[in-house]
Image (tube, grey):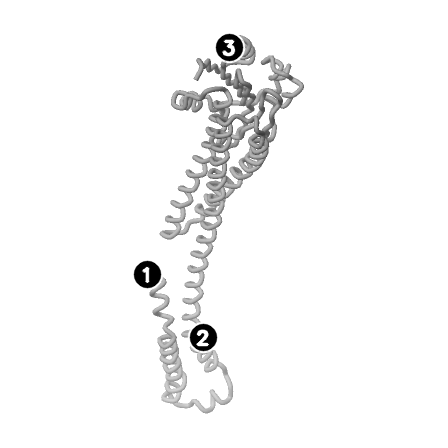
Amino acid sequence: MPEVAITRTDLSQAGERLAAERFVLVDVELPAQAPEPEPPVAEQLGLDVEDLGWFGRRGEPARAQFLGDRAGFVVPVVHGDAIAHIHVVVTDRFLVTVHRGQAGLAGDIVTALRHERPDDTVAVLFLVLQEALATFRRAAVQALLQIEELEDDMFEDRRPEQVYRLAQLRRRSALLHHALRPYLQVTDEILTRRMMSPAFPEQRRAGAQGFQTAARMVLADTESLQDATRRAFASYSSLVAGEQNGVINRLAIVSVIFLPLSFLTGFFGMNFTFLTDKLETRDEFWLLAVGLQAVVLVGSLYVLHRTRIWRRLLDDDRP
């Protein structure tokens, strides 16, 4: 690996380093809320403004293109709870990254350079792309672990805040997938076309294939995260539905017992001529009014025992 000069600086000093150094990696940090720089970033760095008008511009979508002797990328990275975009231009002599706010990968890249020892700036480019993918992998794994913890808690106790947290994680998974999928599509298209060329160096072909393999794994992680959020919502709904079924079964038991009793009470409480004229003695009253209720109560309990509803409720209440 040649001697590398790694500099995080402002635009004016970055342009001087690009003109002076033979092999340089420059990371330019723009203020997060600052307006578009004038003149454009590419012009201040001494780059070709005609092909790089998008470089450093806010709101640019994912991009991957080869421009003769240089390549340009807009790379999404996970920064906290948001998705930031790093603009990258690479040639055989330098690699420049521009981002807004503290969303860059300069620290991670410096650490990786000390261990990987890439041969040229193109190898450094693949290192940058791999580090960007690593931010998505870490975010997906962290969210997946949180979902698993929520699922364990749901089986112990259901709370409304769990649904809110699941909704946040589902939105997180959708955000990761929405940012990652278009980026992987454009990079896969451009790298596949380059690898089909016989003039594409074998070492760079290996780097491109390694990036594509890592990209597929990260995409699988984000899709697994989406599946996990759907599964967690389904589990929560099933658990709540089971609790509601238990409540309905208890209401059914109460109805089996008290509806016949309510009917008998209402019937003998009416002032029909038959009731007022024929039920003349206390024995008749106890026999018909109270005795019938006792018989109905015993019959209801027997029906519940034969249908084993009690046992099913007891089994549902056991942990």
Q: Tell me which residue sits at (55%, 9%) in the image.
A: 19
Residue at disc 1, secondary structure = loop
Pick the front one: 99 or 133: 133
Q: Tell me which residue sits at (59%, 20%) in the image.
A: 69
Give the alpha-carbon distance from disc 3 to disc 1, as whole Å: 73 Å
Which amino acid type is marked by label 3?
Glu
What residue would you read off at disc 3? 21
First in residue order: circle 2 vs circle 3: 3
**Disc 2 or disc 3, which is closer to the eye?**
3
First in residue order: circle 2 vs circle 1: 2
Which amino acid type is marked by label 2?
Leu
Q: Position of residue 20 (x, y in %)?
A: 53, 8
Query: Neighbour class for label 2 at 10 Å: few (<14), some, many (≥20)?
Result: few
What residue would you read off at disc 2? 259
Q: Position of residue 304 (x, y in %)?
A: 38, 75
Pick the front one: 120 or 223: 120
Residue at disc 3, secondary structure = loop
> What is the quadrant of the N terminus in the image?
top left
First in residue order: circle 3 vs circle 1: 3
What residue would you read off at disc 1? 318
Query: Neighbour class for label 1 at 10 Å: few (<14), some, many (≥20)?
Result: few
